[in-house]
Amino acid sequence: MLTQKGQLFPDALQIAIKDKFFHVDVDIDGKERLFMDNAGGSFRLKAAVEKLAQIDAIPDCPERVHQRALYLQRIQEQGERDIKIILNTDEGSIYASLTASGAMFDMVRAIAENVPGDNMVTTVLEHPSSFDAMQFYAGRTQRELRVARSNPETGGVDIDEIIRLIDKNTCLLSVMHASNISGAKFDIEQIVHRARQIKPDLFIIVDAVQHAPHAIIDLKKYPVDGINFAPYKFFGCRGSGISWLSPRAAAFPHHKLAGKPEQAWELGSPAPAQFAVLTEIVDYVCWLGAHFRQADDRREQFCIGMEAIALHERALLAALLEGVDGATGLRNISGVRTFLDHDDLAQRELILAMSIDGLSPTEAVREYEKRGVIVYERIASSIYSKRMLESFGLVGAIRVSPLHCQSLQDIRKFLQITAEIAENFS
């Protein structure tokens, strides 16, 4: 039965899923390890890593006309189609760059330098690649940067707080799909709808790096002008960032070879292996979805898989907070505090922020590592955390971010280790 607290994968499917990823239970040296820092990286699909090596080993340049070059071209074309499957769009330009962060700066620049207006709007919770890009180009184009405040109760940003900053002179809105500190989801559909009621032709960019591995993206429901995600946080491999631009945004002046089409953002020879990785990601999610319901359409099959992932992860989040199989949940372990913890789990992704009395976040992370658990410290001295933490009134937190390939037994083990640490130090 589907509930607000999610639905776990069947046991047999959970085992099959875990087997499709590298190093879920053991590190590369064979030691047992519980990896719960997937918001900083992600477990890698075996098929994605293997396909990357296979295709990247081919010496041929895809910009040729012989058989192997045409094969590489087909791989890239399929990868581009699969990117649009992930995003649910039939148009626009794909921009494969070295990192999603670099592409964000490029997209913000193109819009900021070519769209009239006297202000730009973003939120305090944005990743530095988004926030700093907005800050840099607002300064460079002599515009006011308006920053929406966070809500310490929900861990997100209220829609009204964003909308109040937008007017007919706003040239760009940049907003994230979900927070990588609190896991709070942003209702992008409502944000886009309400923002464009104020300014129908408003340009909007979305940072979906945190959101993409956990839930559905649907550009047909919220037609923005730019969006990015990172394959290495989406079961794939490091070495590329994937972005998409709307036709009107892609047409703005940007770095490109003079002979290329107006909306082309690709520079240099493509890396077909990176596109092959995207196809393996979509293949995997479709495979998972087929265990729940068969669909003839690849996008529909992909969505079924992503829905199953979201429900399983919601169930894991509920177990982390409330406990499982005799292990006390984080909300009730003496000496443990959960931050930004609200009850509507449907509006949260599988990330949580917490602390242990008697330990700084950095000290707690080291104690977890001694016990074979990898988590991450969010501290105010970090450029990736300071602005967001201060907006919540926090000086630091332990970030815990499992992934759907992990099981209820993994959560139970984490809770038992947390209780042991708390007992020893609080």
Image (cartoon, grey):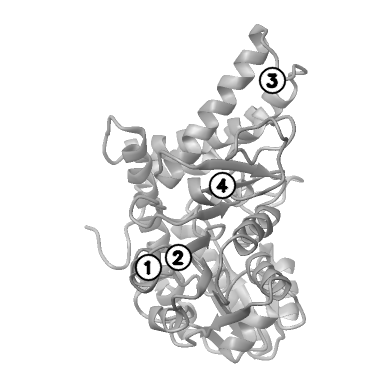
Secondary element at image label 1: helix
Front of the two marks 3 and 1: 1
* Viewer-closest of 179 and 162: 162
**Identity, as a three-letter code, of the amino acid under mark 1:** Arg
**Identity, as a three-letter code, of the amino acid under mark 4:** Ala
Please rate how many residues cluster around mark 4, counting C-alpha atoms within 10 Å: few if below 14, some from 14 to 19, many from 20: many
**Identity, as a three-letter code, of the amino acid under mark 3:** Pro
- Residue 421 % position (x, y): 64, 79
Alpha-carbon span between mark 3 and mark 1:
41 Å
Q: Which label belongs to residue 196?
A: 1
Alpha-carbon span between mark 1 and mark 4:
20 Å
* Viewer-closest of 5 and 85: 85
**Labelled pair 3, 4 in contact (Cβ < 8 Å):** no
Residue assigned mark 3? 62
Secondary element at image label 3: loop
Give the residue furthest to the left: 1
Q: Which label belongs to residue 10?
A: none
Residue ID at (70%, 86%):
359
- Residue 72 % position (x, y): 63, 20
Residue ID at (77%, 82%):
381
Secondary element at image label 4: helix
Alpha-carbon span between mark 4 and mark 2:
15 Å
Residue assigned mark 4? 250
Asked which quadrant contains residue 116, the reply is bottom right
Residue assigned mark 2? 202
| Of callouts 3 and 4, the N-terminal one | 3
Examine the rendering and report whether any part of residue 422 can be seen: no
**Labelled pair 1, 4 in contact (Cβ < 8 Å):** no
